[in-house]
Amino acid sequence: MFKKILFLVFTVSLLSFAMHKYYVSITEAEYNSKSKTFEISIKFIGHDLEKALLNAGAPNLYLGTPKEVEKANYYLELYINQRFHMIADSESLNYKLIGKEINNDDFIYCFLESNKIDSPKKITIKNTLLTEVFNEQANTVYLKVGNQKINYSLNKGKVSETHTIVK
Amino acid sequence: MKKVLLLALVIATTQLLAQENYNYNKFKQLKEELATPTVYRTASGAPGHKYYQQKANYVIDLTLDDKTQKITGKETITYKNNSPDQLDYLWLQLDQNMRAKDSDSKLVNSINMGEEKSFAEIARLHNDFDGGFKLDYVKSGSGKDLKYTINKTMMRIDLPTPLAAGATTSIKIGWWYNINNRDEIGGRSGYEYFKEDDNYLYTIAQFYPRMAVYNETEGWQNKQFLGNGEFTLTFGDFKVNITVPADHIVGATGSLTNPSSVLTSEQRSRFKKAQSEYLKPVIIVTQAEAEEKEKTKASGTKTWSFSATNVRDFAFASSRKFIWDAMAVKYNGNSTIAMSYYPKEGNPLWEQYSTRVVAHTIASYSKHTCDYPYPVAISVHSKSIGMEYPMICFNGGRPNKDGTYSKRTKYAMIGVIIHEVGHNFFPMIINSDERQWTWMDEGLNTFTQYLCEQEWEKGYPSRRGPAYKIVDYMKGDKKNITPIMTNSESLHQFGNNAYGKPAAALNILRETVMGRELFDFAFKTYAERWKLKHPTPADFFRTMEDASGVDLDWFWRGWFYTTDHCDIAIENVEWFKIVTKNPEVEKAIAKELKDAEAVHIGVTRNEKMEVYSDKDPKILDFYNQYDPFKVTLVDKEEHEKYIAKLSENDIKILESDFNYYNIDFVNKGGLVMPILLNFTFKDGSTKEVRIPAEIWRKNDKQVSKVFFFKKEVVNIDMDPWLETADINLDDNSWPRRVQLSKFKLYQKKKYGWGVDGKENTMQRDRRNEELKNEKK
């Protein structure tokens, strides 16, 4: 017999032939051995992120405009925590959004710092950012621990990868 | 920096390449990759003396049913066979069939289930939309039924008698299809429904059976339409009559030939006024007029007639919601009319920018490519898409409901209009095969878009173009990257592959490899040679070399045929000085070096220790007192003798006091690129040295080169102006300077103003005003 797998269905306003064809996010996560935290930057395409936030139930945040809502960072942190997970040596990390940068070329950077973790030996990143809104979303990850650099790309079909850190 | 003394300068001989049984040299000419030149396409990249292209003229009568969102049409295609070949059958494209229930697009779409799906995805999966062409008839010009076979999105018509070289035939086709709701199932064309006022806005394309291209490179280009690889179309003349509700406004490819039967006299006089306005668009249908029409629905219909000459396709937009404005634009002694059609939902952005951006784009592209040959250029507002057709395109960029918009929305809107209007040049005029190569239109267009954006306002925030903007992509996982020269349907990361990377590559050619003058001439030559024709990649590659005199085979090979990236490192730097043999100079240097040597800790600690010789100095002899750094008479005499033997030129070299720097470069990324260096000297001055990529021609893994200066170098930077898309800047300087991560950079400027988006410049300015008032 086939095994039955359940999946979630949710609402997304539209999936159309969009005016840009990039659908990418770039995550750079670097382990800082002094602070013992991961320093993470995530680069989003602005209007894609906005669509995802609306879709996730956040109000219009008016990011980077005079009308930007006060709790904008709270919603961003919530969204990222829902869809970006790091597991270091079987401990699931939490992050704080320490800030963001909004550029006129429609790139939005979010900066996060994880809780403390002793130099990790195995790291799993599960990244489903924006994949609920865009089928073609590609989430590139650049991971750096010590001198070791690892990069890979995740998407709707492949949401996570695990890597061992060699000393 | 390491200081090394040597007796004579040794010129390093270039390392011999490792023995291989095949030529893997990165500068190997592209003879095996590019098609063999023919009488149709020359080795210089120009059309050959026997170049030909087919011609397809269309007369179409069309009805748009606003109640059922249905298109019904009939057409007569007159097809001229300009090829030297006899054609037994014709191939036509039925693009709408991609939406048919049994479409291959759905079958080959390899989306897996995963943990979550949207309702829209599930709805698409179940696909209850009855799309695709429903053909009523296919007849010959004389009205006889023709035998035809439909293969998904392509249709073959078997001719009763073969079409001889130079002969013409005509076909009549009748059809209808359901228009797709773009919000629900997407699409390049379709309709948007506005619930608030119960109205539709139609942007219609691929609405008629179209002739496929027949030529000497592809035969019939009848590759199925799966969704990504766009269109390959034959040039021809169009006469199209579009019947729509009487209160609709229609914008379309071509000139309106019956204005008196569809426009009011007021509208006609406004339109006339627009033909001599060059700065401020003239509003032909105002927002108030459009809003008034939204309230009712006309029962009758009107037929709008358009005619277009030498275009590859035809598209149109229709709605009673349209506001319409226009103005004229001049370029190189020619002129055209720039126009926009948009619903009130697009304002205030659209009235302010759209037509002006269209005008700027036409003038800017005409300068960089070829003169715009058509009578109108139109931008239509349609939610969140960007799609191009000859003379008309459908563009997103919608403000918030309250009329406010972010700076990003504004620039995204301007960017998409420039991009889509720019597509008039690539591929509508310079008509490459989109089904085969996305980069030939999207890449070249994204590059020209960047030039056009930068000419719109100083410091325009272009998203793509400059080399450094492609680094995030180039340094990525190679499993997820394909060479630019990959068929449109097989690309990974569509946007970066076919838009961003070729645009960056062309920018590198323009700014760094060829220089603006040589590049601009060659790029324009390509456009002029292939305007209103069908170029292939080889025609582009060859023309760029042919018109500039720069061998670019290595560049095309690296950037277009591989996924290599640029990562060049300064591996080592050695500093050399000539030995003068002058004891005054050399002994001083020797002493300096000796003094600089590290001293063992025991020696330092023993310094104050009492030793035997303190008690009895007699144990010290000549060797204890001899100063090896003292210049003796013998030293001087020997030096004089040495000098006497040298020629005047030799002495000049000896006394020149130059600093020689031997630098080792390592190519870690595979892509051979120019080496761009900036030396900083002890006195703070700098010198730029630009070495062409050919330095790698014999060894593409590592090269060494000597640089010499009067002044002493304190710092070396490679690619300091971010020209090569080098993915790792940590090893680009000497002494090494590690680049800060994006996170660290943010932490550094966190306490600056405005970076958090919490207070933007507008708010800061307002707060400044408030402070001023308080202080008064």
Image: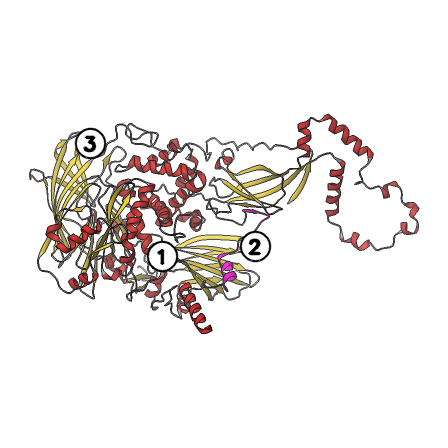
- Callout 3 secondary element: loop
Residue B734 covered by magenta stretch: yes
The quadrant holding residue B652 is top right
**Residue type (three-letter) at the residue carrying disc 3:** Asn
Residue that numbered label 3 is attached to:
B82
Task: Residue B341 in the image: state x and y as whole percent.
Answer: 22, 55
How packed mark 1 is, by other alpha carbons closer than 10 Å (few <14, some 14-19, many 20 or more), is: many
Callout 3: chain: B
The Cα–Cα distance between marks 1 and 2, rounded to whole angstroms, is 32 Å
Q: Nearer the viewer, mark 3 or mark 1?
A: 3
Q: Residue at x 56, y 32 (%)?
A: B14
How packed mark 3 is, by other alpha carbons closer than 10 Å (few <14, some 14-19, many 20 or more), is: some
Mark 1 vs mark 2: which is more N-terminal?
Answer: 1
Q: In this rendering, does residue B329 appear at all?
A: yes
The Cα–Cα distance between marks 3 and 1, rounded to whole angstroms, is 48 Å
Task: Residue B62 in the image: state x and y as whole percent.
Answer: 12, 49
- Image-based side of B100 in relation to B527, left or right: left
Q: Looking at this view, is A30 or B428 the one in front?
A: B428
Q: In this rendering, does residue B556 appear at all?
A: no
Q: Quadrant of the N terminus of chain B?
A: top right
Color style of the picture: secondary structure
How packed mark 2 is, by other alpha carbons closer than 10 Å (few <14, some 14-19, many 20 or more), is: few
Callout 2: chain: A
Callout 1: chain: A
Q: Residue at x 33, y 42 (%)?
A: B367
Start-end of magenta stretch: B731-751
Q: Nearer the viewer, mark 3 or mark 2?
A: 3
Residue that numbered label 1 is attached to:
A156
- Say which mark, if any, is on residue A167: 2
- Whether residue B331 is situated above or below residue B319 in the rendered picture: above
